[in-house]
């Protein structure tokens, strides 16, 4: 069930895209993440391209607390 308004999603994406112009993303190197990239035949650089192409219409859910590491920021879910 989505937790955010369209305006909140737009704000999140704007902030994310702005930050990506300055910083890079650190991806958690989990086996399931590597396997998903392999299954979908997505390269690491394509993954960044997909992130940069996300639109509010792609929003699925979030922000969600990271239960694996509660010290990390909340995460958002998008589908493309």
Image (cartoon, rainbow, N blue to C red):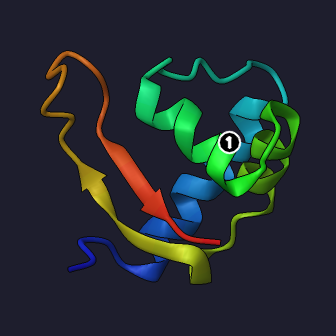
Residue in the foreground of this view, choosing between 37 and 8 = 37
Instruction: Provide the residue designation for mark 1.
Output: 38
In the displayed structure, 76 sits above or below 16; it is below
Residue 34 at what x, y percent from top left?
57, 31
Residue 47 at what x, y percent from top left?
75, 43
Residue 15 at what x, y percent from top left?
62, 45
Rendering quarter of residue 10 = bottom right
Q: Quadrant of the C terminus?
A: bottom right
Residue in the foreground of this view, choosing between 31 and 4 = 31
Relative side of 70 to 36, left or right: left
Q: Mark 1 Cα within 10 Å, few/some/many (few <14, many 20+)?
A: few
Rendering quarter of residue 74 = top left
Relative side of 3 to 51, left or right: left
Rendering quarter of residue 48 = top right
Q: Residue at x 65, y 24 (%)?
A: 25
Q: Residue at x 59, y 17 (%)?
A: 26
């Amino acid at each position: 069930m989505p937790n955010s308004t369209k305006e909140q999603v737009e704000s999140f994406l704007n902030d994310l895209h702005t930050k990506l112009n300055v910083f890079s993303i650190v991806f958690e190197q989990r086996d399931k993440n590597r396997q998903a990239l392999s299954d979908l035949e997505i390269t690491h650089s394509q993954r960044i391209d997909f992130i940069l192409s996300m639109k509010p219409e792609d929003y699925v859910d979030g922000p969600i607390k990271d239960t694996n590491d509660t010290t990390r920021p909340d995460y958002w879910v998008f589908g493309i």
